[in-house]
Amino acid sequence: MINYSDKHRVLWATPRRTATRSCMPIQKYFGFKVAGQHELEIPKDKEDYFFVLNTRNPYDRMISIYHLFCINYNLIPNNFNNWIREKLMEETKYPNQTLNYQIFLKNKITKTPDLLIRVENLYSDILKLPFFNDDSDALFDIINDNILTNSYSSGYNYKEYYDQDLADYVYSYLEEDFVYFNYNKDSWKHGTS
């Protein structure tokens, strides 16, 4: 999803599974408008805006997508190892449905992000937004309800999902994401994001 604020001259992209629901109330508070759901295309008249992009550790994002599509909807396969291998193999068949955000961004957005908001550092990164100088109680409540006590937060223990073989498999498909967004290949070993 890409939202924009003409007042602040900011574009804020929240691709699928990168805290979109957590950020929407903050965007609404600051008067952002929706430019597109998950299309991630920058409107032509806003290409010079400050560009904010949410991102998420690819290991965590794969677990989140798995929970969204398999666990929450009781779809088969219900085994993460099997699902991730099947899903990533589909990448070669359906390249327009890519899970690799860096490739998707390269094809759709030529602008380099001015600020990355990492799901793993959501609160501290949101405070870096150039227009974030409002200390009202209303904004504090929004942050408290949607960031600090986030009911959407995963907190997945990577070691319950990954072993070295599967982590290497995911890395081989999403290496460009790891490199572009500066995520450590061995981050799955640390337990959680």
Image: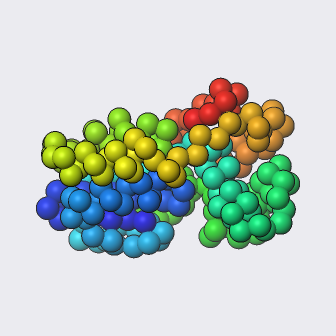
Q: Residue at the spot x=63%, y=52% of the render? A: 64
Q: Residue 17's spot in the image, x, y percent?
A: 54, 56
Outermost residue on the top side: it is 190
Q: Residue at the spot x=43%, y=50% of the render? A: 54
Up the image or down, 95 lies above or below 78; here it is below
**How many labels were placed on the picture?**
0
The reply, left or right, for residue 118 in relation to residue 159 is left
Q: Residue 131's spot in the image, x, y percent?
A: 18, 48
In the rendered view, how is the structure colored?
A: rainbow
Which picture quadrant has residue 183? top right
Q: Residue at the spot x=32%, y=59% of the render? A: 25
Q: Nearer the viewer, residue 128 or 145?
A: 145
* On-image quarter of the C terminus: top right
The reply, left or right, for residue 163 in relation to residue 107 is right
The reply, left or right, for residue 164 in relation to residue 96 is right
Can residue 119 be spotted in the picture? yes
Up the image or down, 182 lies above or below 24; here it is above
Can residue 91 be spotted in the picture? no
Q: Residue 42's spot in the image, x, y percent?
A: 35, 66
